Image (cartoon, grey):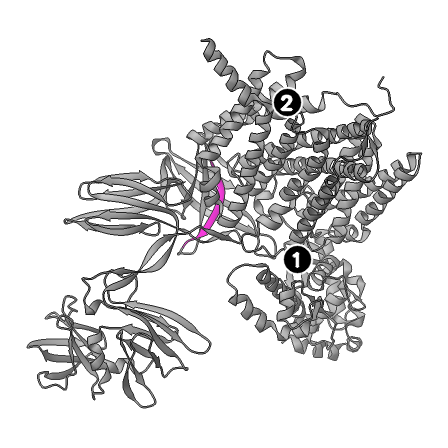
Amino acid sequence: MNNLIRTYRQVELFFGNMKFAVFIILLFAVTLAYGTFMESYHGTEYANRLVYKSWWFMGIQFGMFLSILFATLLRLPPRKSLYGFYVIHAGLIILFLGSFVTYQSGVDGTVSLAPNLPSRQVQVNEDEFKIQFPAKGKEVIIPLPYSAGKRNLGFEYEGVKLSTFLPFAENKEDWIFDPAADKGQASTKYRIFNDNFGEFLTLSLHPQSAYTNTQQLGPLNVHYMPESLADCFAKNTPDGLIVWNGETTGCASPERRDIRRTRQSTSGRELVEVSYDGQNLRFMPEMSPLPLDEKMELNELSQYRVFSKKLFEKSPHLFLFGKKAAFFDKDTQKWEAHAAGPGQEVSLPWMGFKVKTLDHRTDAYPTMVPHYIKPIQDNGQVTVGNLKAVEVEVGGKKFWVNSQEPIAFTLNGERITFELTKRSLTLPYEIVLNQFKMDNDPGTTNPASYESFITLFKGNEGSEKHRVYMNNPLKHKSFTFYQASYFQTNEGPYGSVLSVNFDPGRFWKYLGSLLLVLGSIWHFVLRKKSVVKPGEVRA
Amino acid sequence: MLKFLLVIIISISGSWAQGPMNFCTNDLETFPVQAGGREKPLYVLATETIRYITGSDKVGEFSATEAFCKLSLKAFGMPLELPVSVKVDHIEVRKLLGMKEDQTHLPVMELTAKSDLLMQKTQEIKENNSFKKELNKVQGRLSTYQAIVGARAWTVPVLEKGQISFVPLSEFLTQTRVESAQGKGANPVSYLFEVAKRDYLSVQGEKYLLELRYFKLNLFVWALFASLLGIILFVVMKNKLPGAIITGASIVCQLTAMTIRVMISGRAPITNMYETVMFSGFGALIISIIIFYFRREILFVLAGLACNVLSLMMMKFANGMLDEGISPLVPVLRDNFWLSTHVTTVILSYAALALSWILANSLLLRARFKTVTAAEYRYEVDLIYTSIKFGVVLLSAGVILGGVWADYSWGRFWGWDPKETWSLIVLLVYIAILHGKYTTLIPPTRFVPLVAGSFMSVMMAWFGVNYILASGLHSYGFSEGGAVFLGSFFAIQIAVLILCLSKSGSQVTPS
C-alpha cells in the first residue's frame, strides 16, 4: 500500500511538474504548427489523418490532460491565493472531457440533397469497404483505417482477401504481364506530334486493359486493329471492302474468288452479301461491321466483320496495327501502309503530323493501377491524390477497387460486388429539399446568401417545413443542420449540402470554456502583486 | 454602334465638340455608381480602379476621377490618349514582357500588344506559383482597363418604377436617350447625368456620399501625425499634459474614422486584414492607457503609441498587402455577433501582446547598448509580464469565442482550421512562457528575449496564415506583399535577438 502511494506520488510529481507542463505545451504547439503546414501543402484530410486524428496526437493531448490534472491535485487542499488557478485548471479538465465525449460519440457529417429527392443518409468522413453477395443477400462492411500512409488490411472472408489500402492515390499506367494473351490482344504506345503539339497515345485490344482501341484527337480518328488486318488495308481494291474472321485472324478483299457478293439497296443503305469460309454473311458496312442475322438484327456473337474503307476516306482516319500504320492519302487518292515498328516514325498527310511507335507488346497489357501519393493542395483544392483504393484478391485474381466506382466480380458463377465508400448513418426521418435559393451581391456574381427550403417527413408524426440558411441552422431532436454548400444537378436546379451535427459534449465544452475564461481573469487580472518601480515606495 | 454616338453628340450639340474636357471634371466625384456589390461615389470607384491598374492615384496630370471618365468616353470614339501604365511587380514577368528589371510599369498599349503572350504563358504553367499569380494579376489589370475603355466599368443609376437599377455606361448612353435629351441642359450628356444623379438622390438619399468624405478626410493620416507627435512630447517634455492632449486628439481622429467606416459598411471594422491592423493599432493604444490607469507607468502609453504608429504606417504605406476598400462580406461572416466578438477579442489580445513585444525589444536594446540597473530590469520585466497577462486572458477568451462562433456557424466547436489552430499556438507559446517563468527554465534574462521572439508566432497567426499558409505548396517564392512583409519582420526580429544575445551578459548593473 505504501509502495502504491509512493508510486502515485512519483507519478503525480512527474506529470504535475511545471517543467513537464512547459515541455508538453511546447510539444503540443510545435505539433500544431507542423499540422498547419501539412494542411497547407497536402490538404485538410491528409493533415487530419497524419496529425490531428492520429493516435500519437491523442497521446500528446492526453499528456496535456495529465499535466493539468496532476498540477491541480498537487496543489490541494485549496489555498486562497490559488483560487483562480483552480478555476482555470478545472475548466480545462472539463473542456478536455467534453472534447473526448464529442470525439467518442459525436456525429459530424453531411447530407446531400438533390431537389425533391428524399434522403435520410448522413455521410461521415470515414471510409469503409463493402462486399456484397447479392445471391445470398449478405453484406460485409470493413471499416478502413484512418491513416495517412498505405496500410495492410490483412482481411479475409469467404475466399475474398483484402490486402493493401491506399488512402491517397493516383492512377498510373502500368503494364501487366499476361503470357496467355495472343496476337489479337496486342497493346501499343504511340506518340502523335507535329512541330507545336504532341500527345502520347496508348491503345490496346486486350480485354482487361484500361485503354480502348479507338481514340479521337481533335479532328483525327485513331483506330487500333489486329495486325492481321494490316495487309488488307494496304490493298487498293475498287470497292474497298475487307472481310475479316476474328478467330482465324485471316482477312480478305472480296475480289478473291471464293467470295461471292451481291448488292441490294434497302432504305438507301448498302447491303453486302458475302460468302466467306463457306458461310453466307450479310452486312450493312455503313452501319456496323457486324453481320446481320435472319431477323436482320446485328449478330454480336459473330466472329466475322466487314469494313468498308470508303467510309474512312472523307475525314482523317489513322489505322494502327502495332507494327504497321495505314491511312488514305487524299492527294494520291490511295490507301497507304507503312512499317511502324518500335522506334519508327511515319509521316501522316495531315498538318505535318507524324506518328511514332514507342512500345509494342503482345505479352502484356497497359492498365491503370492506383499508386500511393501524398496529396497536393493547390489554391485550396486538392489537385493530386483524390483517389482511394483497396487491393482485392479473389479466385486467384488480384485487382484494385477504387473510390470512383464499385466493381462486380463473378466467382464460381456467383456475383460479388465491391465498393469503397464513405460511411453513412441513417436518420430516423426523411429530408426533402423543396428549393435552394442563392442571392448575389447587387450587380455582381458574388453569392450574398444561401437558403434551403426543406421538409422533414417523420412517418406517423407528420411533416414539418423549415428554412435553413447561413447562421440560421435547424435544430431537430439533438441534431443540428447547417447550410454548408451547394451543387448543380444535371437537370439544372441547384442541390444543397447541409452539414449534420450531433455533439453530446457541447454542454461540457461550454462550461469548461466559461470556467477557463473566468478563472484566468481572476488569476491574472484581479490579483495585484507587482514589482515596485525603483525609487518609489509603495504606500 | 458606340463609336457613332460621338458623331451624334457632336452633331446635335456644338459645345461637346470641344471634347470631354468640360464634362470630365472632379465634379463627377459625387456621382453615384454601383461596383463590387455596393453603391458608392464615383471618386471611390475611380480611385480604387486606377490604383489597382497603375498603383497610383493619378494618370499624368489628371485625377483618378478625371482619368476614369476620359477613358470611359473612349468607347464612344473620343480621340484621346492618356499615359496609362500598368503595374508589373514580378521580375520574371517583367522579363517576359521585355521590360527592364527595375522598370515597374508598362504602357497599356504595349501590354495590350502582348496580351496573347500573357495568356499563352498562363496556360502553359500548370502549377500555381508566384509567377503565374502575377501573370493573372497583370491580366486582371489589363482586363479592368479594357472594361473602363469599353464603358463597362462605370455604372449609371436609372430610375424605373420608383426603383433604382444600375446599367453600364455603354448601355446608358444610347442613341435614343441622347437624342431625347437634345436641347436640354448645357449638352445632352451632361443633362442625362444630372437627371440620373437627381433620380438616385430622390430615392436613395445622400448616404453614399459619406464614403467620399471618409476617404477625403484622411483621418488616419492625421492620427499618424498626432501619435508620432505624442511620443515626442512624452519623451521630451517633463510635463505630460501636452502629450496627453495630442494622444487624445489621435484617439478622437481614429474613433471618428472607424465610426464613419462602420456607418458605411454597416458592420464591425474587423473583417479584413486592413481593418484588423487598424483596430489592433487603436486597441494597443487603448489597452496601454487602461494598464497605465492601473500601474501608473508612462512606458505603457509610449509602447501603445509606438504600436499605434506602426499600424497606422502599415495602413498608409503597405497598400500591396492591405486593401483599404470597403467590400461586401462573404455569407458566413454576415450578421454574426459571435464573429465580431471573437475577432475583436483576438485582435485586442494581439494588441496587448504587441505592447509586451515593444517593451521587451526596447529593454533588450537598452540593456545591450546602454546600462540598465538590475532593479530597473526587474521592474520592466514585471511591466512586460503585466501586458502578457492581459494578452493571454484576452486571447484565451478570443480562442474560445472562436470555438463558439464555429459552433454557431458550422456546427463544430473546433476543426483544426489553420487560423484557429495558429491562434491556439500563440496562446500555447505565451502560456508556456508564463509556466516556465515559475521554473528555473526561464529566468528574467531569458524571459525578455523569449517574449520579444514569441511575437513572431502572433505575426504568423495574424498574417502568415493568410499570406503563407493559404497560398499553399507552390508559393515558396516570397514575392507577394504579405509574404515579403512577414519575411522581413522575422529577419529583423531574429537579427535583433542575435545582436542583443551575442554579448554574454547584458549590461545590467546591480542596483
Q: Position of residue A238 (x, y in %)?
A: 21, 89
Marker disc for residue A519? 2
Residue under the image location 55 percent in, 27 percent down: A510
* Secondary structure under the numbered disc 1 in the rendered image: strand
**Does B388 appear in magenta?**
no
Question: Are there few (<14), some (14-19), or many (20+) residues within 10 Å of tag 1?
Answer: many
Instruction: Please identify the quarter of the rendering in which residue B334 is found.
Output: top right
Q: From the top left corner, tell me how far across and down residue A22 is, in percent.
A: 60, 29
The image shows residue A333, relative to residue A457, as above or below, that is below
Q: Quadrant of residue A301?
A: bottom left
| Image position, residue B267 (x, y; %) | 67, 42
Q: Which image quadrant: the N terminus of chain A?
A: top left
Whether residue A484 is in magenta: the answer is yes
Tag 1: residue type? Ala
Marker disc for residue B35? 1
The disc placed on residue B263 is none
A144 or A466: nearer the viewer = A144
| Residues at marks 2 and 1, CA–CA distance in whole angstroms | 48 Å
